[in-house]
Amino acid sequence: MTEGRSKRPRPRPRHERPAFRCPPAVHKLTGVYLPKHFAARDRAAVEAFVDAVGGDGRLRGHLALANPQWRSVGPDTVALAIVHGPQAYVSPSWYPSTARHGKVVPTWNYVSVHFTGPLTIHRDAAWLRELVGRLTARHEAGRPSPWHVSDAPRDFIDGQLRAIVGVELAIATVEAKEKLSQNRDAEDRAGALDGLRGEPGPGPAAIADLMTTLPPPRR
């Protein structure tokens, strides 16, 4: 369970929200392959997304104590967290250009945000209890009979907390990518849009909705 993947909370009025601030830039593990035409267009939407998953500029979650990954974290460790949005397969059969020249290949449309920053490990029981309590409250919100951490026996929860470690990433850089067929001409883009509308599942429908917001392709 990670706080960065939690359900998006109801946004607070802008005047009540703390301004998002990144800590000083860090050396990134790797750069995101981000052609200019695939860069996220709406800075305000990206900032709202960052505010939703890490409103105070931090991503928090936990790992199993038995997971050896956390043991490699040192004082200067920099981590990368990837949050995926909708995604969908795009078939060449949807492109009118396929019939004209056949020089097409399949692709995958998607939205993702990469967060990079210093990583801290937490073993303190109080910190972990507060984290899992907040995560549980967020995911249980709106249910007819929400479950609370306090509903379980205290000694049982204490044992569960001893089996996990907390992770906290201080967001230093944010790279948002929207791959939505921006590199296709108007006919191929329309064909992909129609094809996606006929596919099952929420991913293709969400990608199609995002594609309708794109500006017309350049001639």
Image (cartoon, rainbow, N blue to C red):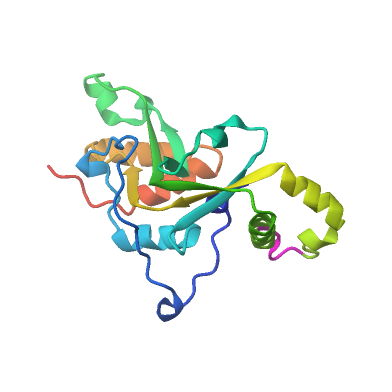
Main SS, magenta region, reads: loop
Can residue 27 be found in the magenta stretch? Answer: no
Compared to 101, does 168 lie above or below? Answer: below
Q: Give the quadrant of the C terminus.
A: top left
Question: Is residue 217 or residue 128 the one in the foreground?
Answer: 128
Question: Is residue 96 or residue 130 the one in the foreground?
Answer: 130
Residue at image point 23% right, 37% down:
183
Classify residue 50 by image quadrant: bottom left
Q: Is residue 184 left or right of residue 194?
A: left
Residue at image point 63% right, 48% down:
123
Q: Is residue 162 left or right of residue 215?
A: right
Whether residue 147 is visible: no
Question: Is residue 183 or residue 190 the one in the foreground?
Answer: 183
| Residue 82 place in picture, x, y as percent | 44, 42
| Residue 23 place in picture, x, y as percent | 34, 57
| Residue 165 place in picture, x, y as percent | 63, 44
Question: Is residue 202 or residue 52 the one in the foreground?
Answer: 52
Whether residue 78 is visible: yes
Residue at image point 68% right, 59% down:
126
Magenta-tinted stretch: 139-143
Residue at image point 29% right, 37% down:
31
| Residue 35 place in picture, x, y as percent | 23, 38
Residue reaching furthest to the front: 75
Residue reaching furthest to the top: 102
For the image shown, how many numbered marks are present on the structure? 0
Residue reaching furthest to the bottom: 15
Can residue 141 be found in the magenta stretch? Answer: yes
Q: Is residue 120 left or right of residue 90?
A: right
